[in-house]
Every structure is written in C-alpha cells, then in structure tokens.
Amino acid sequence: MAGLQLLDPFEGFDEAFKSMWRPVRFELAAPAPSIKLEVSESDAEFHVKAQIPGVRKEDIRVKIDGDVVSISAETKQQKEEKKGKVVKSEFQYGSAQRSFSLGTDVDSAKSKARYENGILELTLPKKPDGQATTLAIQ
C-alpha cells in the first residue's frame, strides 16, 4: 500500500485557467486599397482627386470612355521573416476599382494624370465626342 498515491483532479487547473487570460497577438492583413474621390468642375474641365495610399503609380490604371472614368489600383506586398532555420514568407494582394460618370464627354487626348504622396490628380477637359483611352501617369 505504500505505492498508492492520491490524485488531485484539480491539479494544474490554476495554470490552465491563468493561461486562458494571457494576451493573444493577432496579425491582421492590411486591407485592400480604397479609392476616395473628390470631383470638381469648371466651365472647361473636371478636376478629380483620388486618395489611393500605399499604392505605386505603376499599379494604378485610369480609363476614360466618353463621360465614364474608371480608376483601378492593385497592391502587392511580400514580407519575409527569418529566425534561425525557420523562414516565414507572406504574400498579400489587393485591388480596388471606382467608376463614375461625369455627365459630359471628356477629351482624353488632352487629359492629364499625376500621382504623388498617395493622391492621384486628374485634369479632364470637356469634349463633345470622346473615345476610350488609357492615361499614362506621370
């Protein structure tokens, strides 16, 4: 009988209960870019400011088709983490698109686009009969 031991069914319960309340760290993926617009009009042209933060200008497309303007953007991010022999690599892709009608056709040949510090600025002269065009961003 010397080999018998009493078992406590609650042994280790305190540690298990305490571990439930330890802080947990979650890493959320960065959201896809969103495109926020500000459109103004003068007698001769439209001015568009679009906020597209965190996107390279090479990843932005502007298409003009008559009075419809479409802006699209893509993000591509790669994150690599090395700890000893373990390598962790994450890829993240996202895209956003906005299309809007101006009510008057745009002269796409004279239109201009500029992207700086997360702001895309479009100058879109008015024209009676426009054709679909893709703008080069400077």
Image: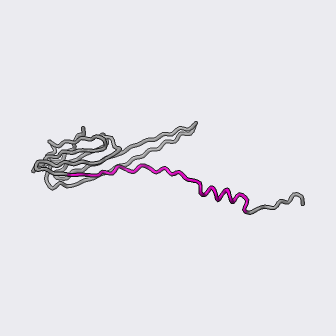
Q: Residue furthest bottom?
A: 9
135 on left or right of 89? left
Instruction: Report the quarter where the C terminus lies.
Output: top left
User: Number of callouts in the render?
Assistant: 0
Q: In terms of depth relative to the viewer, which is nearer, 85 or 56?
A: 56
Residue 84 counted in the magenta span? no
80 on left or right of 21? left
Q: Residue furthest top?
A: 84
Residue 127, given in percent of the width and then of the height, sits at 11, 48
Residue 64, given in percent of the width and then of the height, sits at 20, 48
Residue 38 counted in the magenta span? yes
Q: Quadrant of residue 61?
A: top left
**Chief secondary structure of the magenta portion:** loop
Residue 95, given in percent of the width and then of the height, sits at 34, 49
Rendered residue at 58%/37% (across/down): 85
Rendered residue at 26%/44% (across/down): 120
Q: In terms of depth relative to the viewer, which is nearer, 95 or 5?
A: 5
Q: Quadrant of residue 111?
A: top left
Asked if residue 110 is positioned above or below residue 37 in the image, the reply reads above
Asked if residue 1 is positioned above or below residue 106 in the image, the reply reads below
Residue 91, given in percent of the width and then of the height, sits at 44, 44
67 on left or right of 30? left
Rendered residue at 30%/41% (across/down): 117
Q: How is the image coloured?
A: one colour
Rendered residue at 19%/53% (across/down): 68
Instruction: Report the quarter where the N terminus lies.
Output: bottom right
Span of residues in magenta: 10-39
